[in-house]
Image (cartoon, rainbow, N blue to C red):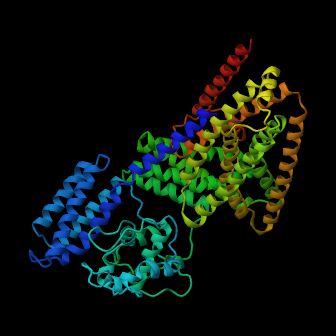
Amino acid sequence: MKRFNWALTLLFFGLTAHLAQASGPGPERILHLLSYVGVDYPMTVADGQIVDQGEYVEQVEFAEAVEQILQNLPATVQSPQLLEDSRTLKRLIDERRPGQEIKAMTAKLSEAVTKAYDIKLAPRGTPEPLSVANLYQQMCSACHGATGLGDGIAGAGMEPAPANFHDTERMNELTLFGLYNTITLGVEGTGMASYANLSESQRWSLAAFVAGYVTERPQGKVTSPFNLDQLATLTPVQVQAQGQNVEQFVQLRAHPDVIESDKPAPLVFAKQTLAQSWQAVEAGDFEQAYQLSIGAYLEGFELVEASLDNLDKALRKDIELAMFAYRDGLRDRLSLDELQGRYNRAQSALDQAQILLDEGGLSPLLSFIASLIILLREGLEAILVLAAIFAFLKRSGATSSLKYVHSGWIAALVCGLATWAVASYLFNISGASRELTEGMTALLATAILLWVGIWMHSKAHASNWQQYIKDKLSASLSSGQNIGFAVLAFVAVYREIFEIILFYQALWLQAGPEGQQAVIFGMLAAAVLLVVLSVVIFKLAMRVPVGMFFKVNAAIMFALAVIFAGRGIAALQETGSIVSIPLNLPEATWLGIYADGVTLMSQAVLIALIALMTVYQRKARI
C-alpha cells in the first residue's frame, strides 16, 4: 500500500510540474499583443511619420515580444512561417508602414497562430454580464470609472490612460476574445493588471459587460443570426464589411445571455456535425474533419444510444460501427470515394434512427424499463465493490476504518454532481473530455481493483488470515490501507456518475410528458433493488467460510478489473485517443466485452497477469 501512495504522490507532483511548465507566456499572449498592435499602431504613425513616440516604441516592443514568445513555444510545422511573419511585422513597423498594412499583417499572423496552436477563442459557456456588475465596480471602476468612461480616481495621470469603453471607434476594432484576453493577461507596462485569478466564466462575463457600454440590452429573448464563436471572434468592423447587421452584432456580443437557445437535438446535431466534417474533407482539412467526426458521435449520437437500444439494438450497433469506420477512414487518409461511401452509410443509418425515434418513441412501460436498467446496470458494479470492502472490514474487526470508505463514496457523489453542474451550467465540457475522464477513471479503477484482488487472494489461506487478524488486534488498518480503500470507493462510484446523469437526461427528453413519471418510478425501483442487493450481498459475504469469502471477493475484484479495463479502453477509443480494431463478434458491453481487437487483447493480457499472480501466490504458500 505504501508503494501505491508513493505512486499517487509522484503522479500529483508530475502533474503539478507539468502545469507549472505550461504557465509561461503562450500563444494566447501573442494574440493579446497582436490585438494591441493592430488597434493602436494606426494612431501612432501617419504618412510615414511618428505621431506618438511613446506609443510607437510600445508597438516595437510588442512586435519583438511576439517573435521571442514564438521562439520559446513548442515547435510545430507552421513555426518557421510564423517566425518569418513575425519578423515581417517587426520590419513593417520599423519602416513606419501605413496602419492598414500593419492591421492586415497582425490579423494574418493571429489567424495563423490560432490555427497552429488550436487556441479556443470562444467561451465554453454563455457569458452572463449582469452577474459581474458588482465585480466590475469592485475591481475595475477605480481606474475605468463607475460608468466605463475611463475617468476613475485611481486612473488619473496614468500613461496610457485607462480605456474608455464608450469609445465606439476603438471598441469596434476589438473582439470579445481580445477583451477577455486583456482581462486574463493584463497589459505589461501599464496599470492594467492580470485578473487570471478570476474564473474563466467571470472573465468572459466581464468582457461582455464592458462591451455593453456602447449598446443597449435587448428587451426579452431574441433570435441571433450569429453563433457564440462569431460573437467572440469577429469585430464590428469585420461584420460591417461582410454586409451584416453590425448594430445587432454589437448588441448581442455584449448580451449573449438574451439569445434564445437553438441547440439541436442530439441526432440532429450528429447529422449536422457529420455534414460539417464532410465539408472539411472537401476543403482538404482532414484534421478538422476528424475532430468533427468525433464530436458528432460524442456530443450527438452517444446521447441517444441508451434510448435507441430499447427500440433497435442492432441499428444502434450499426450506426456506431458506421461512424467509427468513417472516423478511422479520416485518420488513415483513405481515398475520397471510399470516404464518401463511409460517410453516406453513417448518415443513412442516422436517418433510420431519426425515423425510428420520431415514430416509435418510448411508451411509459419502455420508459420505466429503460430507467430501471440504467441505474441498476451502472450502480451494480459500485455496489459489488462497496459490499466487498464493507464485508472485509467487518470480518477483520476494523470497523473504525468504515468511515474512510463512507467518506470515499460520499465524496464521489458530491464530486459527481458538482462535475455535472459545472459541465451543464458553467463550462461546456466536451464529449471528448467527458469520455477521457471516464476512460482514465476506469483504468485507474482497474489498477486499484487488481491490487485489492491480489491482496485479498493472498488472505484466502486460513493460516494467512489468522496471522493477519493477529497483526491487526487494534481493529484498525494502517493509514495507507485506509486511503487505498477510500480511493477505491471514490473511483468505483465517481466513474458511474457521468453516464447515469447523461443517460437520464436523454431518456427524460425522449420519454416526453407521458413517460417522465415512469422514468421517475424506474429510478426509484432501481434504487430499492440496489439497496436490497447490497444487503443480500453483504449478508452472504458474512456467512461464507473465511477462505471462500476471500476467494469470492478476489474473484469479484478480478472480474470488475477486467470489465473496467474494457470500458476504459472503449471510452478512450471513442475520443480517438486509442486506435480501434473492429471484429465481427458478439459483444456484451455491460460486461465490458466489446467486438474490438484492442480491448479484447488488453483484457486477455490482464487475465493472464491475474492467473500468473494467483499461481505465484499458491506456490509461495507451499
Q: Quadrant of the rendered structure where residue 371 is?
A: bottom right
Q: Position of residue 604 (x, y in %)?
A: 63, 26
Residue at 45% in and 88% down: 216
Residue depicted at x 39% and y 70%: 183
Q: Residue most toward the top?
A: 622
Above or below: residue 29 compared with residue 489: below
> Where is residue 208 drawn, in percent x and y?
44, 76
Task: Using the image as rendered, state which of residue 193 and residue 81 is in the foreground.
Answer: 193
Location of residue 65 by image quarter: bottom left
Residue projecting furthest to the front: 474
Q: Residue at x 73, y 46 (%)?
A: 405
Report x, y in % for residue 318. Answer: 63, 44
Q: Quadrant of the N terminus?
A: top right
- Residue 513 visible in image: yes
Q: Nearer the viewer, residue 157 or 91?
A: 157
Left/right placement of residue 520 relative to residue 54 reads right
Q: From the viewer's perspective, is 198 left or right of 620? A: left
| Depicted 120 relative to depicted 546: above or below | below
Q: Position of residue 350 (x, y in %)?
A: 60, 53
Q: Is residue 591 above or below residue 365?
A: above
